[in-house]
Amino acid sequence: MSSTPPATRADAVRNRERLLHVAADCFEQKGAAFSVDEVAALAGIGTGTFYRNFPTKSALLAALVAQQLDALATGTVDDGDAGAAVLRFVAEAIAGSRRKHDLVVALEAAGYATAEEISEASTRFRQRFGEVLTRAQAEGTIRADLGLEDLLALLSAATAAAARRGSSAAAVAAVIGDGLRPQPI
């Protein structure tokens, strides 16, 4: 007997992707104030299909967070200038801070903050972004004395402040970007 799970049907993959896309749009427009029935109807999928993909609304929110982390990780992979990729990531993370913050708050309120799916996506993101940061430091475009955890902590504080205060994301990203570049001696 084989222990390999059966392949997921193509229509099931499409349904899941459609549900995630619609849920992301609903979240963008309403925050967490959307219903499972609304998402299923807008996706053109029955609620039974919704629940086969996501046992709860919290599971859907967790999948959205994991999807965003994977998108961030993919977005930081750059064949060219790794320093530019790091700076672009910083700017995009701060610019999208309000939406991301709201999604994480909604997820935490639902009691789903430690989901395995999110943990795995976070690990993938940290690995990929860490590789880009290391390349940028080797190129000399990002200061070498900054560790991945330090940069992520700085970004966490900056995005939280931008989300709460509505401060200028571009100005905050520019200041952080200046601090990430190697300083002349």
Image (spheres, rainbow, N blue to C red):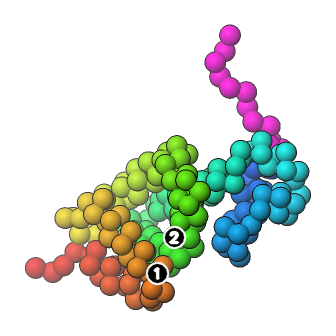
Please provide percent x and percent y for residue 52.
77, 42
In this figure, which residue is indicated by the disc labeled 1?
164
Instruction: Give whichever of 159, 11 is nearer the camera.
Output: 159
Is 62 situated above or below 157? Answer: above
Please indicate, yes or no, whether residue 79 appears anywhere in the rendered image.
yes
Left or right: 145 as drawn, with respect to 119: left
Residue 21 located within the stretch drawn in magenta: no
In the rendered structure, are the residues bearing label 2 and label 1 in contact, judged by CB atoms less than 8 Å apart? yes
Identify which amino acid the numbered label 2 is placed on. His
When the figure is inspected, residue 132 is found, relative to residue 157, above or below; the finding is above
Going 32% across and 79% down the picture, which residue do you hit? 176
Identify the residue at image location x=77%, y=62%: 35
Q: Mark 2 packing: few (<14 Cα in 10 Å), some, or many (20+)?
A: some
**Residue under pointer 2:** 101
Residue 9 painted magenta: yes
Secondary element under disc 1, as helix, strand or loop, is helix
Instruction: Give the Cα distance between marks 2 and 1.
Output: 9 Å
Figure quadrant of the N terminus? top right
Is residue 52 rendered to the left or right of residue 150?
right
* Amino acid at dot 1: Arg
In this picture, which residue range is highlighted in magenta? 1-13
Residue 66 in view, yes or no: no
Quadrant for the C terminus, please.
Answer: bottom left
